[in-house]
Amino acid sequence: MLREVDKKVGLIGRISGCIKDERDQRYVKHSTQEMLTQRVLQIAAGYEDCNDCDDLRSDSLLKTCVGRLPQSGEHLASQPTMSRLENSVTSRELYQIGRCMVDSFVDSYRQEPSVIILDCDDTNTNTYGQQDLGFYNHYYHNYCFMPLHIYEGLSGKLITTILKPGRRSKQNNVSSLLQRLISQIRNQWKNTVIIVRGDSHFASNNFMQWCDGQCNIGFITGLSGNQKLNKLADVTIQSARREFKQYGKNVKRYHSFQYQAGTWEMPQKVIVKVEISDKGTNIRYIVTNMTDYKSKNLYEKGYCARGAMELRIKEHKLYLKSDRASCTSFMANQFRLFMHSVAYVLLHTMQKELFSGTEFENATFKTIQNKVIKTAAWVKELKTKIKIELPECCPIKQLQTNAYERLSLLRAS
């Protein structure tokens, strides 16, 4: 199934085209595309470690997916060969791979969407040993990297993942990255409304200023509280406290006002949420340039919806094990992160396209790995064809049958 999904998406082929093979082709037994296919499909199936290549290089189904005969074909790449591939990729090639990820995201839409939301957040990938740019992070109390994940907030599609050193990015760096990303998307989607959504460290003055000069570019990000903000929201805070004291029921209030920090070029709309209960007072701020919407809707339906991104990072990090950044080279670890991201794209596409309308449409990747991908099969290599026999008694037999029928339709289209 995953091989057919990749044939439709074409992402592995795109990425292999970004990597220049410097090896002497007279002695090459494993092409770049074959190794990428092997590694990505292993990750998607739950075998994330490079050492797993040694045990799975003779697997009949995996050899078939890579394009070799299951029994008589040569074995696939071993762990040392795969490690050499990871450490051979240059910074220029990584940049091209990143652009391919974004292009693949754009091509996944049949037509230009009216609006997309760029959900941005970073997470920690703990490091062990002398890995390049693995710094101590006080928040996570460990040495780590801080990979940046960017998803489309409405569909859950992965746009790109960028490995960063183990510290918070400077706002200028975040602004530059987002501007490049949006410009690449805008080259193909001229009329789409693009909204950037993130927590407080994405509230960059440079990015806000850039957005004000663009058409159909919005942002809604968290904003750290301070004394000036608390003073501007004081009327709302005191009113909520009086209401809670009078009626004894939980109170939630929203209010918006114009605010300009010392480093900002111009005032922006700030929304405050004041929530008072018997547990205390909770005050939160967000900043946005979307002035035509009510404060409550922007906060609850706009900003709070970014919580779904935590589940997507969980799928990427916990079930695809994308935190296995054990290479010494920073660029090799970035390449590893890209391979895990390609596995995410294939699984997410399979989940939403092949399993649409079934119980697996919103299942976790772990459930799909255990119940669908890890299904026993008998592989026979015949003279003119390869025959794969699936078990007759299987709880998801009908699901697989329907999925293969959809794949045949996709292949014919």
Image (cartoon, rainbow, N blue to C red):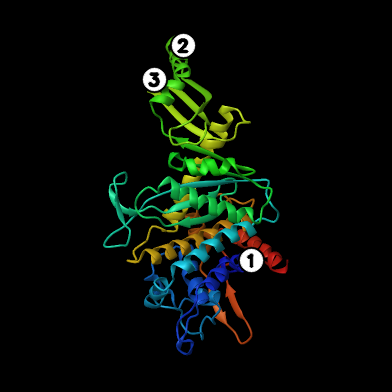
Q: Earlier in the sequence, mark 2 or mark 1?
A: 1
Estimate the x, y position of residue 294 in percent, counting from the top left. 60, 27
**C-alpha distance separating marks 2 and 1:** 60 Å
- From where the camera sits, is residue 157 visible? no
Tell me if 247 is positioned left or right of 69 in this view. left
Q: In the rendering, at what x and y percent does residue 201 appear?
A: 43, 42
Dot 3: element: loop
Mark 1 crowd level (few <14, some 14–19, many ≥20, 10 Å Cα): some
Give the residue pinned by disc 1: 8
Q: CA distance from mark 3 to mark 2?
A: 12 Å
Q: Is residue 413 visible?
A: yes
Can you give x and y, in whole percent of width and height, for residue 103 in the image?
60, 60
**Secondary structure at numbered mark 2:** helix
Residue that badge 2 annotates = 247
CB atoms of marks 3 and 2 within 8 Å: no
Quadrant location of residue 211?
A: top right
